[in-house]
């Protein structure tokens, strides 16, 4: 089945009422038939609902459907993108281990890996996403994860997924790809050798800026990489916290199973059934929206590139962009999602342009159906000096846009009047 068909049907079996829309199962817990049934569920002899921190029928549809779109075996929905990333790393690494991450990461992922995980005894080492060969010198016997974004936010670079996963596979290390900006519609990292993907569902999945959520997906056949692999002893030895279960010995996707039984159980960053339902609504038209976001962003990027006040436009769909070849290789039909940025001469000029726009909202978010404009130097990167700004690829005159679904005629007209005001 095609992705658009799966997005409408996968993972849902209608209840006895024949309900067309997936019902929202707002409930904390579920009644067991009898004591034996309860015991069977707890020992995994039977699979079923226990408590909404572990599973929920609405969230289950979201997880199954998203896993289908990504081409994976199973998924775990979480309360945010940040908790999905934490689960992916914490499911593989423990105190004393290290992870190797791209430098070009979302701000929250940078602080989580550099600061918060450090306090848990997990060290992050960084490589330039344009130089995968740097990874070789960073990995050792304690490396548990290689983590990067397929289409990076906010720097808008495209990772060479095959080059990175080839190095990881040589060493038997799991790769985790944040696929938030590309979405499964434009990029499917499992087809290029990745093991696990994570997403902020708060962005394109909801699509209308409605709710915070996240999801982690594992590929088919990950058990072959985990079984007997010394790096991942906790997948091969009895789990003392779950009556001696050995995750690689049972016929269920082991990475998600452990994340559910151990991390969701003990950390509890679970998706609300209502939010899962919102994400299901968003997924129904995700592929239509991603095509339109990409079309609008390319047309806007082309307009900006031709404008005399604009010094540079960053959008991987432009032939002038250094990521263009990678985007053609990894993204469906070379479509590059809705994120773009452009540079004008100075901070003052950028401020004037952002203030002069009427259709673009000044918001720190991406992936909304409404267009969003941000000026990183005065907001997310405010504390950096002009030299530091240039070093991290955010010059003072840089403006970032998350291109929405408004008419492209109106989007171009508004940015034109702001540039020429
Ligand atoms: C927004 C974002 C996150 C964090 O997601 P939340 O849902 O806000 O926690 C992680 N990665 C990327 C690429 C993002 O854009």
Image (cartoon, rainbow, N blue to C red):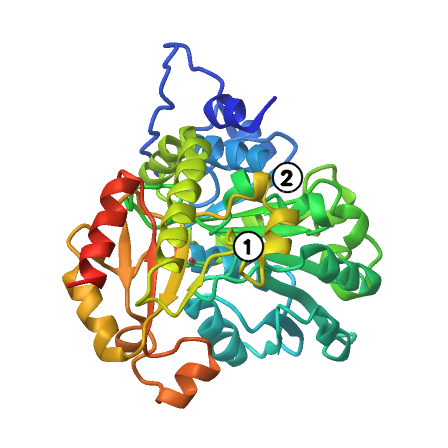
* Of the pair 43 and 362, the residue shown nearer to us: 362
- Residue 205 visible in this rendered orientation of the protein: no
Pinpoint residue 28: horizontal percent, then vertical percent. Answer: 35, 39
- Residue 328 visible in this rendered orientation of the protein: yes
- Relative height, residue 361 to residue 354 (above, below): above
Q: Where is the N terminus found, in terms of image quarters?
A: top right
Pinpoint residue 279: horizontal percent, then vertical percent. Answer: 38, 37
Residue at the image point whose x is 36% and y is 41% from the top = 206
Q: Where is the C terminus found, in terms of image quarters?
A: bottom left
Q: Are marks 2 and 1 in contact (CB under 8 Å)?
A: no
SS label for mark 2: loop
Pinpoint residue 412: horizontal percent, then vertical percent. Answer: 27, 48
Q: Which residue is the site of mark 1? A: 319
**Mark 1: few/some/many CA within 10 Å (<14, 14-19, 20+):** few
The quarter of the image that holds ligand 1 is bottom left
Which marked residue is nearer to the observer: mark 2 or mark 1?
A: 1
Q: Is residue 284 left or right of residue 355?
A: right
Ligand 1 near label 1 (Cβ, under 8 Å)?
Answer: no
Marks 2 and 1, how far apart at CA: 32 Å
Residue 72, labelled with which disc? 2
Q: Is residue 193 left or right of residue 16?
A: right
Residue at the image point whose x is 74% and y is 47% from the top = 222
- Relative height, residue 23 to residue 107 (above, below): above
* Of the pair 324 and 19, the residue shown nearer to us: 324
Q: Quadrant of residue 158?
A: bottom right
**Mark 2: few/some/many CA within 10 Å (<14, 14-19, 20+):** many
SS label for mark 1: loop
């Amino acid at each position: 089945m095609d992705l658009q068909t799966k997005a409408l049907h996968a993972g849902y079996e209608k209840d006895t009422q024949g309900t067309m829309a997936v019902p929202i199962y707002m409930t904390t817990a579920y009644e067991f038939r009898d004591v034996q049934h309860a015991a069977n569920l707890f020992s995994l002899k039977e699979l079923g609902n226990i408590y909404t921190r572990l599973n929920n029928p609405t969230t289950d549809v979201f997880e199954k459907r998203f896993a289908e779109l990504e081409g994976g075996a199973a998924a775990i929905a979480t309360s945010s993108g940040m908790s999905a990333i934490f689960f992916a790393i914490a499911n593989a690494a423990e105190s004393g281990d290290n992870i190797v991450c791209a430098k070009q990461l979302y701000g929250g992922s940078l602080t989580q890996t550099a600061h918060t995980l450090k306090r848990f005894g997990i060290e992050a080492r960084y490589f330039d996403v344009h130089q995968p060969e740097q990874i070789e010198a960073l990995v050792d016997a304690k490396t548990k994860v290689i983590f990067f974004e397929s289409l990076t936010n906010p720097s808008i670079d495209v990772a060479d997924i095959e080059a990175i996963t080839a190095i990881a596979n040589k060493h038997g290390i799991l790769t985790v790809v944040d696929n938030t900006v590309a979405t499964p519609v434009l990029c499917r990292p499992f087809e290029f050798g990745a093991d696990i993907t994570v997403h902020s569902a708060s962005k394109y999945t909801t699509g209308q800026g409605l709710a915070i959520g996240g999801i982690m997906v594992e590929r088919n056949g990950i058990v072959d990489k985990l079984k007997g692999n010394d790096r991942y002893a906790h997948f091969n030895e009895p789990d003392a916290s779950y009556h001696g279960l050995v995750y690689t010995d049972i016929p269920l996707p082991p990475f998600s199973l452990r994340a559910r039984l151990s991390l969701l159980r003990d950390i509890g960053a679970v998706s609300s059934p209502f939010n899962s339902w919102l994400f299901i609504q968003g997924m129904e038209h995700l592929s239509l929206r991603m095509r339109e976001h990409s079309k609008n962003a390319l047309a806007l990027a082309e307009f900006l590139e031709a404008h005399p006040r604009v010094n540079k436009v960053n959008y991987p769909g432009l032939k002038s962009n250094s990521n263009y070849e990678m985007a053609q290789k990894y993204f469906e039909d070379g479509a590059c999602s809705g994120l773009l940025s452009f540079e004008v001469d100075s901070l003052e000029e950028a401020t004037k342009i952002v203030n002069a726009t009427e259709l673009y909202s000044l918001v720190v978010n991406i992936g909304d159906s409404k267009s969003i404009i941000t000026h990183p130097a005065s907001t997310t990167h405010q504390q950096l000096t002009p030299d530091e700004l240039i070093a991290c690829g955010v010059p003072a005159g840089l403006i970032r846009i998350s291109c929405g679904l408004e008419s492209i005629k109106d989007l171009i007209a508004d940015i034109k009047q702001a540039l020429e005001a």
